[in-house]
Image (tube, helix red, strand yellow):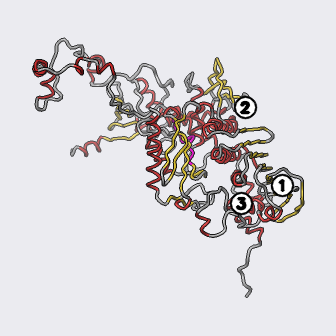
Amino acid sequence: MADIIQLLPDNIANQIAAGEVIQRPSSAVKELLENAVDAGATEIKLIVSDSGKALISVVDNGKGMSETDARMAFERHATSKIRNIEDLFRIKTMGFRGEALASIAAVAQVELKSRRAEDELGTYIEIENSNVLKQEACASAVGSTISMKNLFFNVPARRNFLKSNPAEMRHIVDEFIRVSMAFPEIFFSLTSNGQEVFHLEAGSLKQRIVQILGNNYTAKLVSVKEDTDYMNVYGFVGKPETAKKTRGDQYFFVNNRFIKSAYLNHAVNSAFENMIAKDSFPSYVLFIDLDPSVVDINVHPTKQEIKFEDEKIVYAFVQAAVKHALAQFSIAPSLDFTLNAEIQGLDAVSKPFTLENRESAAISNLYKTFTGKHQAHKIEPNEKSELKHWREFFVSKDAEGVGLKTEGNNQEVFSYEKQPAANAQHSAFSIQPLASNYIQLHNTYIIAATNNGFMLVHQQHAHERILYEKYSTAVHSKTPATQKSLFPVTLELATPDAVLLEDLLPDIAALGYEVEPFGTNTFVIQGTPADVAHGNEKHSIDLLLEQFKHFSSEIKYSKREKLVRCMSRQQAIKAGQALGQHEMQTLIEQLFTCTTPNVTPTGSPTYLEFKEDYLDRMFGR
């Protein structure tokens, strides 16, 4: 019987290796940009066509390669950065796999032009399917130009799994930002389909952050810098007012390599404790420099996840550095123990406390209150007190009669028309208002009597369900309800957000937004869905983009479904908002006209029901 195990041909082995390294166009962009940085370039230009599917080209003015090096670079496990096994744990450069160019050459048609400063002529190489088709001398500028065309041309199945052009372009922009942010001293540009998307002049880290994330960060960055023997932490954090409702502009770099670390992210969040809302996330661009031997960057193929030898030390240093920076710039609350000159001039400070003063103080009611045993809370009754009628200020006569508090505000949050319960299956939950009143608990829950007990409704969850079904219906209708703006609002976005919004324009139009492009990274909001309050148009779209970018779910949803879920979460009334009687009644009536009233779109309950027999058992009856 013949042997059945055999070695794979080189071209197939290379394609399998390419699956680890090159998953999509942005993976190739990352590898090529990192190689250009390692070549010592001061100018790096990225040119893409058809979101990298047709062309990805990186032009640099680095040191270039000799004829032999240019050929060797495309061999598997060929690298200039590792000589022995110890070098693997002392890597300070960016790309080092030794498989990047070999992987790219296995799944694309590659052209390379390169020349060193000491050579008169450069080298031109053409490779397809891991085979060198042409190698010859050529005229070339110092540095390297590498172009890869028709990605996955020989692996059609992989090409079919690529996303839409705008989606792939977003990934390319992300990788471009991560590399260009780490090296502000290098000029970077990104051109897509002949149009320049980024033009980043060399400068300081702060200038690079503002160039990428937008001018609104100019006066809102706090410098972080702490140097120790073990590690250095430097960079910038955004002031508390830049905090967003989703994980927005957050960048961590270890030895200039972008990483993702929930552990370090927690360190920064804890430094911002009590300065931003619990459901908000701070913005930061932080760099950690430490000995490469105490970091393992080989735990993930893309090297975006790493392991520290001592995580706790790194966590403590990062947290302390951010806290110190916030305190130093008078953002964190601090105590000032120095006495003001005016205070020092007061009689109470400058003159002695005489025996007469002491006796006078001892017979006062205030002194007795604080010195008497168990009397720290005692306040003497005073008929002249202006606070005598304080209770009447908060509680109306009617509310006192039924033991309820008054409506939280007069402005109605809801403007729905009353609808009869449409579903017979919910007749078991027919609401019987207690004395025509609902009770709001902690400005979050609504207590309502039912025909056999009572129910506890979560106001935010309930409103999310109502809005979700409303928007779901809207996206499938031909004419969504749009509220035209009398004065159109101009919206200026950072480049990544502008790329995303352009991709989402048809889908947000189905929700009722009327947004038009208006030059580079600028849009005009002509109309919004009827629920969006006037004057809130910009914030609404900003938040929608943030939530869409960081939409977390194990299930893959369509763009429209994601948008509907984001919109319902964004526009729902929040826990902590006081509601009036009419608003509570409308909310509950609308909830029970929904097809699925008992859960939110994400599966959380909208209400809990407490039946009479269960209550009786609780009280032992």
Image disc number at residue 520: 2
Disc 1 on helix, strand or loop? strand
Q: Find the residue positioned furthest to the top.
A: 384
x%, y% of residue 79?
Answer: 71, 64
**Which range of residues does the magenta coloring cover?**
243-252
Residue 402 vertical position relative to residue 607 in the rendered view, above or below: above
Image disc number at residue 217: none
The residue under the point 80% across, 50% down is 55
Instruction: Check if residue 351 falls in the magenta segment.
Output: no
The secondary structure that dominates the magenta segment is loop
Q: Quadrant of the image for the N terminus? A: bottom right
Residue placed under numbered mark 3 in the picture: 100
x%, y% of residue 349?
Answer: 24, 21
Give residue 89's quadrant in the image. bottom right
Query: Residue flagged by tag 1: what amino acid is it?
Result: Lys
x%, y% of residue 536?
Answer: 56, 25
**Which of labels 1 and 3 is toward the front?**
1
Task: Report the front residue among 272 and 156.
Answer: 272
Comes first in the chain, label 2 or label 3: 3
Residue placed under numbered mark 1 in the picture: 113
Query: Residue flagged by tag 3: what amino acid is it?
Result: Ala
Crowding at dot 2, Cα within 10 Å, few <14 / some 14-19 / many 20+, comes out as few
Query: Residue flagged by tag 2: what amino acid is it?
Result: Thr
